Image (spheres, helix red, strand yellow):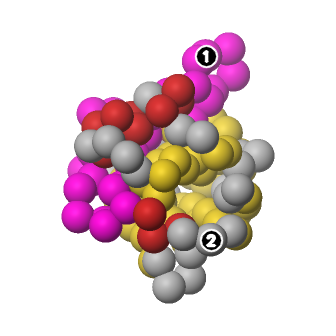
Amino acid sequence: QVQLVESGGGLVQAGGSLRLSCAASGRSFSRYAMGWFRQAVGKEREFVAVISASGAIIYYADSVKGRFTISRDSAKSAVYLQMNKLKPEDTAVYYCAGAEQQFPPVRYKTPSGMDYWGKGTLVTVSS
């Protein structure tokens, strides 16, 4: 069992930056693919970024490519999302998610591919 707790959300002006953190508890974090998803009001939860258990393979949604960076620190059992050049359309609740990696990391680009979820942290980008 893995528990995930996000932090780092808040209010920021368009063009600004935020860094989200996700702390994981439980064993075997280094075997987990980890990802970030987001859900805006009235919309479905959508993929943002995923990083493989080894950290060697990363995928981004086209909407955030070049602006967001996902990383992980297995020694700290943590995963991060550095968000730069934020836009009002990035406003959403951001969720950290994970699953023990048994398939290529592309499998974890959908919410249904993840087994564990945090409660989310709100990011609001003002124009």
Q: Quadrant of residue 2?
A: bottom right
Q: Residue furthest top?
A: 42
Q: Is residue 83 visible?
A: no
Q: Which residue bears the numbered disc 2?
A: 27
Q: In the displayed structure, does residue 51 sit left or right of residue 123?
A: left
Q: Identify the element where label 2 is drawn.
A: loop
Q: Position of residue 35 (x, y in %)?
A: 47, 49
Q: Is residue 26 visible?
A: yes
Could you tell me which quadrant the N terminus lies in? Answer: bottom right
Q: Secondary structure at mark 1?
A: loop
Residue 45 falls left or right of residue 51: right
Q: Residue furthest bottom?
A: 75
Task: Tell me the number on the disc at residue 85.
Answer: none
At 23% across and 64% down in the image, what residue appears? 56
Image location (x, y in percent) of residue 54 = 31, 67
Query: Callout 2: few (<14), some (14-19), or many (20+) C-alpha neighbours within 10 Å?
Result: few
Residue beneath the point at 29% across and 37% down: 106
Determine the CA span between mark 1 and mark 2: 33 Å
Look at 56% across and 82% down and name the residue there.
76
Badge 1: few (under 14), some or many (20 or more) residues near its Cα, within 10 Å? Answer: few
Q: Which residue is mark 1?
A: 43
Q: With respect to residue 20, does 118 lie above or below?
A: above
Q: Is residue 74 above or below residue 53?
A: below
Tell me which amino acid carries mark 1. Answer: Lys
Quarter of the image holding residue 60?
top left
Residue 59 is a magenta residue: yes
Q: Is residue 42 above or below residue 96?
A: above
Q: Earlier in the sequence, mark 1 or mark 2?
A: 2
The range drawn in magenta is 38-66
Q: Give the residue furthest to the right.
A: 119
- Tell me the kind of residue under disc 2: Arg
